[in-house]
């Protein structure tokens, strides 16, 4: 930040309101003085909020409040890059201290605060590889990975998740499948998701060993596992064996929506400076300080032991449900090939009552219980230490009141069949396209990702030829009342075909 030239004498009157004074630790760009203990982000921003400075800087509310109930509570903390508040893209003070605290907690070489959710982390991981690389991409990846591959211009080979025996439910990628794929064709990186939306975990450490043997980097979307390092029985399944991994602190920790963290492992060959530079390409140059503050607070809260206590509570709840089951409802349990299951996530299979997950979700909402998501056969409930005990009593009461139906509903994995892409993802997304109704798009090449959201896994993948099985899935999702992405007014984008003259 450029300093004003001229006299340093204060022009404010000596009587009346005194000039606001900033604490000694607030230096230009947030850098602590020699031998000074780095101050935390809440301390730094809190001091500035309390200083009463005349704020001739953005944001426009000037810390004086905004409309709505959050205005006066949030506005004083919503600042910008100033002397003392540090800079997310070149941190030297409180933000750097927060990143180092996350690195220590997660076993990373360095951690990077994100204000664009795990989407920002996923884009950065894929862009940091360089351009036009070959990526072995788990086909159950989030749609943001599709965007990352396209932005970087990577070529893709796909690896498909394996499902549990007897349960075609939320499979995971296995080390054996990665070994087979990399032996068939070399890749610069492997991209996996663990855990997935249902809490199913892949063997990240085993996959990492395979990747290193073949000279490939391992990138892991662990958006749904931010709490793993703090939960007994799950800490071993944190993705610290990967070269790069991201976690969405807002999904399970006490952080605000969009708050996430990207981690680089000690073994990652990409430098911290290169990763930081890549992040600066995709993240805003005006990051939200309330989001970064919430990340700092969320980590400190997670380290209090609350997740250990919450884990014990959820295990007791699972035991209670097993002892007093609800007819036609069961809980998803760990099974091969899962390396583990996030037991703090309650996935209720409800199709045994003759209703779909979407129908069950509607009934639960009518009872004042709002799940995270539903599919054709289940509802997913995310739990955290912030849940009052009374919510669980309400949940189990609502489950017993679920309606009975006579429908036949089965879980449909988002991906119907294994295919070889016709076009690169980037080429498909940037090709001239036209909207085609779902009913008539079989045989066409998809020009965008489309599927059910959540979980945000693409059933129609850019560059793949759409098959009848894909169409049936999309129509089944729509008929069940699931939200669709990549579909507008019943149509999805397909690569425009050349017409014969």
Image (cartoon, grey):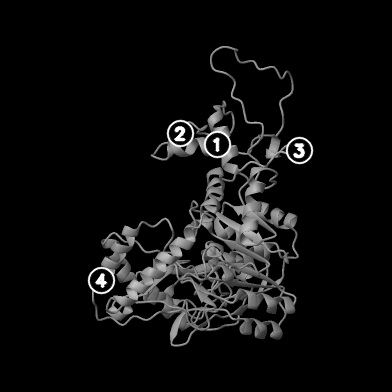
Compared to 109, does 156 lie above or below? below
Cα distance between the residues tagged 2 and 4: 45 Å
State the residue position of label 4. 400
Judge the density around disc 3: few (<14), some (14-19), many (≥20) Cα neighbours within 10 Å: few
Cα distance between the residues tagged 1 and 2: 16 Å
Looking at the rendered image, the disc whose residue lies closer to the viewer, 3 or 2, is 3
Q: Can residue 386 be spotted in the picture?
A: yes
- Say which quadrant the C terminus sits in: bottom right
Query: Left or right of 359: which side holds 310?
Result: right
Compared to 37, does 420 lie above or below? below
Give whichever of 254, 463 is nearer the camera: 254
Looking at the rendered image, the disc whose residue lies closer to the viewer, 3 or 4, is 3
State the residue position of label 3. 34
Cα distance between the residues tagged 3 and 1: 22 Å
- Find residue 466 and report its horizontal and vertical position in percent: 51, 79
- Find residue 27 and report its horizontal and vertical position in percent: 69, 34
Query: Left or right of 432: which side holds 270?
Result: right
Mark with earlier residue (3, 1)? 3
Mark with earlier residue (1, 2)? 1
State the residue position of label 1. 46
State the residue position of label 2. 65
- Find residue 473 and report its horizontal and vertical position in percent: 42, 78
Asked if the residue at tag 2 contacts the one at tag 3, i.e. Cβ–Cβ closer than 8 Å, the answer is no
Quarter location, residue 93: top right
User: SS at mark 2?
Assistant: loop
Cα distance between the residues tagged 3 and 2: 36 Å
The structure residue drawn at horizontal position 61% and vertical position 71%, both measured from the top left corner, is 425
């Amino acid at each position: 930040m450029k300093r004003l030239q001229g006299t340093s004498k204060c022009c404010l009157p000596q009587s009346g309101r005194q000039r606001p004074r900033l604490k000694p630790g607030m230096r230009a760009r947030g850098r602590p003085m020699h031998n000074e203990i780095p101050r935390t982000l809440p301390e730094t921003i809190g001091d500035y909020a309390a200083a009463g400075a005349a704020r001739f800087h953005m944001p426009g509310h000037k810390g004086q409040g905004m409309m709505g109930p959050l205005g006066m509570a949030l506005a004083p903390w919503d600042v910008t890059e100033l002397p003392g508040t540090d800079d997310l893209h070149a941190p030297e003070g409180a933000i750097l201290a927060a990143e180092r605290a996350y690195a220590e907690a997660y076993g990373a070489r360095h951690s990077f605060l994100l204000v664009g959710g795990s989407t920002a982390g996923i884009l950065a991981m894929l862009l940091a590889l360089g351009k036009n690389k070959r990526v072995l991409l788990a086909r159950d990846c989030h749609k943001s990975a599709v965007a990352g591959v396209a932005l970087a211009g990577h070529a893709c080979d796909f690896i498909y998740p394996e499902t549990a025996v007897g349960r075609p439910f939320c499979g995971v990628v296995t080390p054996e499948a990665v070994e087979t794929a990399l032996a068939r064709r070399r890749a610069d990186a492997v991209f996996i998701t663990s855990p997935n939306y249902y809490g199913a975990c892949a063997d990240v450490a085993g996959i990492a060993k395979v990747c290193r043997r073949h000279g490939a980097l391992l990138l892991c979307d662990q958006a749904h596992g931010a709490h793993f390092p703090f939960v007994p029985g799950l800490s071993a399944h944190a993705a610290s064996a990967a070269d790069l991994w991201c976690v969405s602190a807002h999904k399970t920790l006490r952080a605000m929506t969009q708050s996430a963290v990207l981690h680089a492992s000690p073994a990652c060959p990409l430098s911290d400076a290169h990763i930081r530079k890549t992040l600066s390409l995709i993240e805003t140059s005006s990051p939200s300080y309330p989001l970064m503050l919430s990340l700092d607070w969320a980590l400190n809260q997670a380290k209090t032991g609350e997740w250990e206590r919450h884990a014990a509570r959820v295990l007791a709840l699972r035991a209670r449900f097993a002892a007093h089951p609800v007819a036609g409802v069961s809980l998803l349990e760990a099974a091969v090939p899962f390396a583990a299951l996030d037991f703090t996530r309650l996935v209720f299979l409800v199709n045994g009552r003759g209703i779909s997950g979407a129908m069950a979700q509607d009934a639960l909402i009518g009872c004042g219980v709002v799940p995270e998501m539903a599919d054709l056969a289940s509802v997913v409930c995310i739990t955290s230490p912030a849940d009052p005990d009374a919510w669980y009593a309400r949940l189990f009461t609502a489950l017993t009141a679920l309606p009975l139906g006579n429908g036949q509903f089965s879980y449909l994995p988002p991906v119907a069949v294994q295919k070889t892409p016709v076009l690169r993802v980037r080429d498909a997304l940037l090709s001239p396209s036209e909207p085609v109704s779902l009913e008539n798009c079989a045989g066409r090449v998809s020009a965008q990702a489309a599927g059910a959201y959540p979980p945000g896994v693409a059933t129609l993948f850019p560059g793949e030829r759409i098959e009848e099985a894909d169409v049936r899935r999309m129509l089944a999702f729509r008929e069940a009342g699931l939200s669709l992405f990549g579909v507008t007014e019943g149509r999805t984008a397909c690569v425009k075909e050349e017409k014969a003259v």
